[in-house]
Amino acid sequence: MKSFLIIILIFLSVVGNSQNNDESQLALEYYRNKEFEKASVLYLKLYNKDKVKIYYNYYLYCLFELKEFDEAEKFVKKEIKKSSDDLSLLVDYGFIYKSKNQPNDANEQFDNAIKKLAPDQVQIVNLANAFISKREYEYAELTYLKGRKLIRDNYPFNLELANLYQIQRNYQKMIDEYLDLLIISETYIQTVQNRLNNAIYSDKDSSLVKTLKTSIVKRVQKYSEFNIYSELLIWLYIQDKDFKSAFTYSKALDKRNKESGERLISLARIAVSNLDFEIALECYKYVIDKDKNGDFFIIAKNEYLNTLYQKIIIAKDYSDAEIAELEQNYLTTLNELGEKSSTISLIKELSYIQAFYLRKSDVAIERLENAISFPGLKPADLYEAKLVLADIYLYSGDLWTAAIYYAQVEKSNANSPIGYEAKFKKSKLAYYSGDFKWAEAQLDVLKASTSKLIANDAFYLSSIINDNTALDTITTPLEMFSRAELSIFRNNDSIAELILDSISKQFPTHSLSDDIAFLKSKIYEKTKNYNKSLELLEKIVKDYSYDILADDALYEMAKIYDYQLNDKTKAMEAYKDILVKYPGSIFVVEARKRFRLLRGDLLKNESSLFGNS
């Protein structure tokens, strides 16, 4: 009998819940269809039955839509008698008066709600939220300020007030609350940075950053004993890409706190990622000059050289004198540290510079041949060194030795990124040599590579070979084109341009037209003729938007605007076009990253670098 009763009770409960759900859905449907009369009847019934706040709110919404203010007043008044501790009801009551154009009565209820506040954080926050939901921001502010007095040191409501001031666009008060919070506890630095970053992103007229800088500088001057304001100012300069100012304050903090230079290393790395090589070099030089026995001396020394290297390889920003100076810096550093397994990265970079920029292939080969026999050399370093060595042999014209080293790396690293890279380079060597069918067979395997970049390059080269070696197609244009590519690889750009022009003249309607334009754009970019390079890339994007090179051309355009011409607007447009028009492109990830960076978004790994001393 007892079991039977339990089953009956469960059944009735399920039926009751099911009925409630049905009525709730029906009420919402009425409300969405603006049938407020029908919706109000159901919501009142549901609220009287379950006392759920959402039903209360929707019932009031319906009465407001129906302009039944007297009915709403009676209803809320009755609820106040039942729940006198729920101060949000007084806000509703006051809002009814306001809707009836009785502002004095409304303010009386609002004031009454604040008067009744107890030293209860939850009650204070709930009342403030009730005011905010009615856009009564001044009363929300009064609520938090009264709460601050009631609770005192236990909870000061800085974050809540800052958020409220942001809604009102009262940036000075918002900033003051965040800065005051950091005096209370520096552990809030990450929260404050995240909140400020969101506010900066939402600031349409860019007035916030200027106000923020001024406010923080004043705090730095007033509270010089607190590092936290200098930390925040450095962070802000980084967001604004003002690495020079960030360097000035970072250096000052390092000296004041007698630090080891770590914050300068961190700043240098961020500057490098933003291609501000000059400031990065200043950061590293400061650490190098600071203490030859310091914890970060060797790191700074190595990364200083690597930054110079990147300035040349990535930014293509160099003169002959700078190349010679870089070589000398490498030689000096290696003389100090020694040529051994721990300096293999420096040796690889020096060898690459000597071969490809100073035409000292023999010297570079000798140094690398010696380096790959160092005792204690890590396998990864060995194979990377062999790849560079193979590239230099190819550059110098020794295709046979280059092929041997590529094959060694491929064989020892099957199914790994460096193995795929070696296989691709070996395939390209065959392509340079005119062995198109063998190269194509190898490339077809690489198209399934887990490395997207290798797979993409393999797909492109395989397509070129396939399209230009069909049974009824002469291979002369492809042979000439591959020779032009090899000439570019060997830095014989003038010869490459002559070959490409010859193809265009002899075979004006050939399918390689867009490929020729793309290759010539690279030559013009190397010689810093950016306008000509952009002209060719724009032609590819416009006339060959359906073809395999379209997203490559768009990405190259973006990089020229971004890195060479410093045209932020056009760079962002090009990056955005990649995201919108070519969502499957391998460049999407980098395009999105650069687009967000140029737009001013905060990179996660940058937000916390200066969060703690």
Image (cartoon, rainbow, N blue to C red):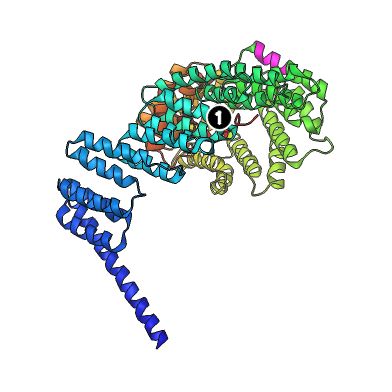
Please state, as top left, top right, bottom left or bottom right, where the C terminus lies in the image: top right
| Few, some or many residues within 10 Å of mark 1 (<14, 14–19, 20+) | some
**In the image, residue 441 lies at what x, y percent?**
56, 47
Taking the spot 84% from the left edge, 37% from the top edge, the residue there is 375
Q: Can you tell which quarter of the image residue 509 is in?
A: top left
Tag 1's secondary structure?
Answer: helix
- Residue 195 vertical position relative to residue 14 in the rendered view, above or below: above
Taking the spot 81% from the left edge, 24% from the top edge, the residue there is 337
- Residue 110 vertical position relative to residue 493 in the rendered view, above or below: below
Q: Can you tell which quarter of the image residue 140 is in?
A: top left
The residue labelled by disc 1 is: 182
Apparent side of residue 253 relative to residue 527 in the rendered image (left or right): right
- Residue 118 vertical position relative to residue 26 in the rendered view, above or below: above
Magenta residues?
Answer: 321-327
**In the image, residue 314 lies at what x, y percent?**
58, 25
**In the image, residue 361 lies at what x, y percent?**
72, 23
Q: Nearer the viewer, residue 470 or 203?
A: 203
Please state, as top left, top right, bottom left or bottom right, where the N terminus lies in the image: bottom left
Q: Nearer the viewer, residue 289 or 273?
A: 289
Q: What secondary structure do most residues of the magenta stretch adopt?
A: helix
Residue 304 shown in magenta: no
Q: Residue furthest right?
A: 375
Q: Nearer the viewer, residue 108 or 363?
A: 108
Q: Can you tell which quarter of the image residue 532 is in?
A: top left
Residue 176 visible at all: yes
Residue 511 visible at all: no
Taking the spot 74% from the left edge, 19% from the top edge, the residue there is 288
User: Please, what is the three-letter code of the amino acid marked with disc 1?
Assistant: Leu
